[in-house]
């Protein structure tokens, strides 16, 4: 399958175009420490995406 | 219908007043990408949603957003309740205070009052779900921006981080709802008709 | 009004468990056949229900259906959540 602009093609590129697709989350179990999950904001470790950004200029 | 549980979804215990932070965080109360907009968006869209599971999800996430609205209100309230007259005057908070004292009034940080133009309920489930996915990302970005401002306040950081992470989880759920929706439609053309409108019309006309 | 640390700890535990149920609810809304998640939900829903009832008896009602009162209206007397612990 032809790669465009060096983008790696994957299975999703065979799906109907003119639509967006979010991959299904699979049930891989819950976090071990519910208190930690509560503070994080999710009990699913795969969904834990913290913010670490800081403005840098120059 | 709704029942109220007398606790916040996540605790808010802020000991130091901070008018500048409150002025920014109020955007998540009544701003375009805030929790009131989110809850009204999903709780409005749910009615004309053709698929029961998707309507159920809109209802459940819309309900959670009301709990988030309450948390953000608590944050702004606790950041302002012990402000001195001098702090009110020096921080720029005087412009809000003159109309609302320390009351919570849904507006954006820039002053635009909450209004229904800040969300859409299009009556087309594909369109509505893209609106919802975008809304969750906009809210996440707003929380990212707030986190950059909240430098030395762990009391404020904790609930904001929680709220930000919820946006990411909601995005995933709306994305899955979109998958559920497309799986019920013809993959050769998802846009052939509006499943929330045209089907019933087809049945009426035989 | 100061609140004892045991009360705050119990309320926090209820918050944690209820959050687990919220997460599982949203997951099951889009994965209605995921049995492992349903089993977890059923398990924690029972515990959370008992904890809420116990808390409401020991301290104050968390929901109005648990607000059985005699001389003083317990629902109205409960602390307002947005005031924080302080």
Image (spheres, coloured by chain):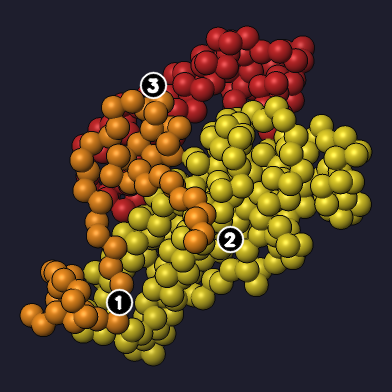
Chain colours: A orange, B yellow, C red
- Secondary structure type for disc 3: helix
Q: Nearer the viewer, residue B127 or A2?
A: A2
Q: Nearer the viewer, residue B68 or B196?
A: B68
Q: Does residue A45 appear in this view?
A: yes
Q: With B149 as the anchor, is B103 left or right in this view?
A: right
Q: With B15 as the anchor, is B48 left or right in this view?
A: left
Question: What whole-number distance in Å separates the C-alpha atoms at marks 3 and 2?
Answer: 35 Å
Q: Is residue C84 above or below residue B73?
A: above
Q: Which residue is mark 1?
A: A19
Residue at point 60%, 56% (across, down): B34
- Secondary structure type for disc 1: loop
Q: Is residue B152 above or below residue A49?
A: above
* Residue C59 picture location, percent across and down: 62, 13
Q: Which residue is mark 2?
A: B33
Question: What whole-number distance in Å separates the C-alpha atoms at marks 1 and 3?
Answer: 42 Å
Image depth: mark 1 or mark 3 in front: 1
């Amino acid at each position: 399958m032809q790669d465009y602009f060096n983008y790696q093609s994957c299975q999703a590129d065979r799906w109907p175009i003119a639509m967006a697709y979010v991959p299904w989350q699979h049930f891989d179990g819950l976090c071990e420490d519910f208190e930690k999950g509560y503070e994080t904001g999710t009990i699913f470790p795969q969904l834990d995406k913290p913010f670490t950004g800081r403005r840098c200029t120059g | 219908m709704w029942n109220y549980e007398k606790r916040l979804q996540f605790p808010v215990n802020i000991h130091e007043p901070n008018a500048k932070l409150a002025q920014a965080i109020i955007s998540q109360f009544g701003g375009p990408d805030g929790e009131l907009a989110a809850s009204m968006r999903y709780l409005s869209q749910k009615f004309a949603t053709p698929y029961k599971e998707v309507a159920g999800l809109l209802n459940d996430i819309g309900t959670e957003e009301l709990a988030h609205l309450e948390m953000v209100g608590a944050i702004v309230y606790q950041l302002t309740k012990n402000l001195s007259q001098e702090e009110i005057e020096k921080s720029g908070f005087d412009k809000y205070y003159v109309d609302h004292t320390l009351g919570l009034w849904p507006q954006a940080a820039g002053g635009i009052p909450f209004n229904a133009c800040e969300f859409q309920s299009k009556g087309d489930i594909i369109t509505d779900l893209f609106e919802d996915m975008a809304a969750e990302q906009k809210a996440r970005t707003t929380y990212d921006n707030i986190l950059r401002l909240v430098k030395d306040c762990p009391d404020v950081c904790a609930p904001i981080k929680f709220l930000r992470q919820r946006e990411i989880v909601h995005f995933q759920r709306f994305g899955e709802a979109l998958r559920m929706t497309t799986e019920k439609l013809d993959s050769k053309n998802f846009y052939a008709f509006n499943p929330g409108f045209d089907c019933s019309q087809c049945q009426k006309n035989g | 009004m100061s609140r004892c640390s045991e009360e705050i700890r119990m309320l926090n535990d209820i918050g944690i468990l209820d959050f687990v149920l919220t997460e599982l609810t949203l997951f099951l809304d889009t994965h209605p056949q995921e049995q492992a998640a349903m089993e977890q939900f059923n398990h924690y829903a029972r515990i959370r229900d008992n904890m809420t009832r116990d808390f409401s008896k020991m301290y104050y009602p968390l929901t109005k259906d648990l607000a059985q009162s005699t001389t003083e209206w317990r629902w109205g007397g409960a602390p307002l959540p947005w005031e924080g612990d302080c």
